[in-house]
């Protein structure tokens, strides 16, 4: 083995050790399971300024289930949990990108997307979708008559399936928001 | 409520009594009987009301129990049908998938003896991935190329069974991972993402075959990191190429792949990549690889090799532009004399993808054009190629392809290999 190879291997091992120690040095504690970026209850509390309303359940009607199936490309869940107050609803949804479910929080206000965040990312590719430079594209989009997002969300090369999963969750949340009392509140206010 | 009803009854009775007063005055005994009867009636009504209240409370409790049972049933059904997102069970943490592509090539060559009409199941790949826990996971891919593998007396055989990936990945922390085993090298566009529904053209581009020998995997270890700015990096130490120095494939990069089969580890290689994808729609990436000995043999006139490659991908709506460049520089007297010490190639590929109406059989259609310039070592690996074609997707994971290729070689001795071809293909992943 040449001197250069030895140097590279030693450098590689040192790099691994340094990265492994990084979270311990920063937080003073061993690293935890790292795929959870923000837990659901924290996300909900943040979206309602620290005063989250009680959790509610939406049981989609037959018609809504059909529309959700068209958006998701598979049979939707029998019921969806959400939090709602005023004209705002918050949804925690799971969709598979390539192999594993991505858990995202989607906040809808006045039938527009207020915020999208990845809460848990389990995929091997498509890490870009969890960062703000991607999720900020969803802000203020709404669902048009063809049940498409009102604006474009640019793809990320190598992360197409994760991007599509994120779009499906955003569209599903917008659609389900319409079926909640919070959407009716908004409509009543508009009148 | 009962009191109101009683008062109403009393009122009615009272009215009747006052009417009868004109006819006949009731006695005190009559009045006593009347009040006693009304008291009895009020008592009965009160009992009925209490019974109704009790029944209502019981019904409320039943409804609550039924609701809880319904929710439990729904949760159970959902877990059975979709799996548990948290993966409590091993089968929820194990995924099976794959991809396949079947081609038809109709090649009209300058030298008629090289004409070819052929159909081939180019590759069928199955993958199995398993998550041991939230931080440790296994990836694998097993591929059969060209439909079958058979024993032949002379060893000729177009098919191959290959393990393309078999590695363990560990999360070091939220942004850094390490992996060890057999993995795809972080170079180029197609090497890591090559499912047929993700690229244009029935056949893959030639630069990522002749210069970057995709699909290219090696045994080794790697670390990687990704950051909120959109910057990511990879660094890998792995087995190197064993490039032939004689025969018809001499100095051919692609023939140097050891495919992890009893691979010589006399001279290792190192690959580093830096990428930026912090602007949606844009990806910029550059990679460098150092081979400590391209032939794995000292003193044979072939020494160190350096690969430098860069690519850009830009998406704007349906428009996409891909461009890639790659170059090898190889040290050594013998390879220098042969003129194989510098091999390079580049391509550019604009495309446009249209969404089709939902009533259509196909959900999307894409058209593309590609130009490639190859400067490999062998005469047949020095050519320019134009290509146009179309992809049709009935669903995201299935694609039908058609394209037209026009290849022109630069060396006159190889111009019999010039060809025009029409290709058809179907590809899928699941």
Image (tube, rainbow, N blue to C red):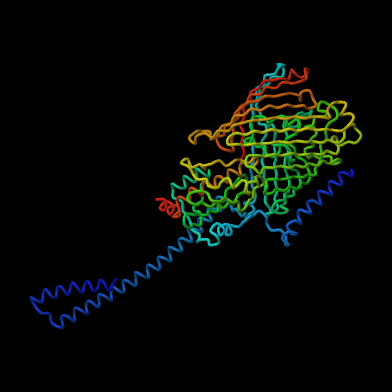
User: Considering the image in quadrants, where does the N terminus of chain B appear?
Assistant: bottom left
Q: Position of residue B378 (x, y in %)?
A: 79, 25
Question: Would residue B334 be found to the left or right of residue A185 on screen?
Answer: right
Q: Position of residue B36 (x, y in %)?
A: 22, 80
Q: Position of residue B350 (x, y in %)?
A: 64, 30
* Depth order, front residue of B23/A47: A47
B373 w.r.t. B307: above or below: above
Question: Would residue B115 be found to the left or right of residue A57 on screen?
Answer: right
Q: Image quadrant of residue B419?
A: top right
Farthest residue in the bottom direction?
Answer: B28
**Residue at the spot x=69%, y=33% of the render?**
B323
Farthest residue in the right direction?
Answer: B299
Q: Position of residue A135 (x, y in %)?
A: 59, 47
A88 w.r.t. A157: above or below: below
* Depth order, front residue of B369/B19: B369
Question: Would residue B191 be found to the left or right of residue A155 on screen?
Answer: right
Q: Image quadrant of residue B144?
A: top right
Residue B80 can be seen in this image: no
Residue B17 can be seen in this image: yes
Q: Image quadrant of residue B277?
A: top right
* Depth order, front residue of B41/A164: A164
User: Considering the image in quadrants, where does the C terminus of chain B appear?
Assistant: top right
**Residue at the spot x=57%, y=58% of the render?**
A46
């Amino acid at each position: 083995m040449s001197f250069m190879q030895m140097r590279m291997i030693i450098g590689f091992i040192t790099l691994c050790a340094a990265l492994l120690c990084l979270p311990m040095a920063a937080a003073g504690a061993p690293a935890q399971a790292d795929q959870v970026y923000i837990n659901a209850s924290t996300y909900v509390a943040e979206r309602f300024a620290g005063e989250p309303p009680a959790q509610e359940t939406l049981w989609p009607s037959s018609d809504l289930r059909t529309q959700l199936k068209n958006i998701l490309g598979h049979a939707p869940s029998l019921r969806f949990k959400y939090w709602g107050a005023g004209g705002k609803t918050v949804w925690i949804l799971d969709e598979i990108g390539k192999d594993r479910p991505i858990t995202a929080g989607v906040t809808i206000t006045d039938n527009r997307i207020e915020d999208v965040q990845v809460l848990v990312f389990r995929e091997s590719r498509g890490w870009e979708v969890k960062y703000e430079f991607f999720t900020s594209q969803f802000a203020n989009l709404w669902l048009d008559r063809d049940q498409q997002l009102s604006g474009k969300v640019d793809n990320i090369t190598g992360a197409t399936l994760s991007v599509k999963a994120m779009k499906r969750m955003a569209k599903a949340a917008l659609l389900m928001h319409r079926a909640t009392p919070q959407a009716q509140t908004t409509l009543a206010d508009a009148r | 409520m009962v009191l109101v009803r009683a008062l109403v009854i009393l009122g009615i009775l009272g009215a009747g009594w006052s009417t009868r007063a004109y006819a006949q005055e009731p006695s005190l005994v009559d009045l006593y009987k009347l009040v006693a009867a009304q008291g009895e009636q009020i008592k009965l009504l009160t009992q009925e009301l209490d019974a109704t209240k009790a029944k209502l409370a019981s019904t409320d409790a039943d409804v609550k129990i039924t609701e809880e049972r319904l929710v439990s049933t729904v949760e159970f059904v959902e877990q059975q049908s979709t799996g548990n997102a948290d993966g409590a069970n091993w089968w929820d943490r194990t995924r099976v998938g794959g991809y396949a592509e079947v081609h038809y090539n109709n090649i009209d060559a300058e030298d008629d003896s090289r004409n070819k009409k052929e159909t081939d199941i180019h590759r069928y790949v199955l993958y199995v991935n398993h998550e041991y826990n939230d931080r440790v996971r296994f990836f694998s891919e097993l591929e059969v190329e060209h439909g079958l593998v058979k024993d032949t007396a002379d060893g000729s055989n177009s098919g191959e069974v290959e393990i393309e990936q078999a590695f363990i990945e560990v999360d070091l922390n939220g942004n850094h991972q390490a992996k060890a085993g057999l993995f795809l090298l972080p170079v180029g566009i197609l090497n890591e993402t090559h499912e047929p529904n993700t690229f244009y053209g029935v056949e893959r581009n030639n630069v990522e075959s002749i210069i970057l020998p995709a699909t290219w995997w090696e045994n080794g270890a790697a670390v990687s990191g990704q950051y909120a700015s959109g910057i990511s990096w990879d660094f890998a130490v792995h087995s190197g190429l064993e490039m032939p120095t004689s025969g018809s494939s001499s100095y051919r990069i692609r023939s140097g792949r050891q495919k992890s089969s009893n691979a010589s580890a006399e001279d290792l290689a190192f690959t580093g990549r830096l990428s930026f994808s912090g602007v949606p729609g844009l990806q910029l990436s550059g990679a460098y690889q150092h081979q400590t000995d391209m032939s794995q043999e000292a003193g044979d006139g072939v020494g160190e090799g350096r690969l430098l490659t860069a690519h850009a991908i830009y998406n704007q709506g349906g428009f996409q532009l891909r461009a890639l460049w790659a170059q090898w520089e190889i040290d050594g007297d013998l390879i220098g004399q042969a003129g194989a010490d510098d091999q390079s190639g580049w391509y550019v590929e604009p495309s446009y993808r249209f969404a089709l109406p939902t009533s259509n059989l196909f959900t999307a259609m894409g058209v593309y054009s590609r130009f490639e310039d190859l400067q490999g070592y062998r005469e047949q690996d020095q050519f320019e190629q134009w290509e146009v074609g179309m992809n049709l997707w009935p669903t995201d994971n299935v694609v039908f392809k058609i394209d037209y290729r026009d290849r022109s070689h630069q060396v006159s001795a190889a111009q019999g290999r010039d060809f025009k071809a029409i290709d058809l293909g179907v590809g899928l992943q699941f």
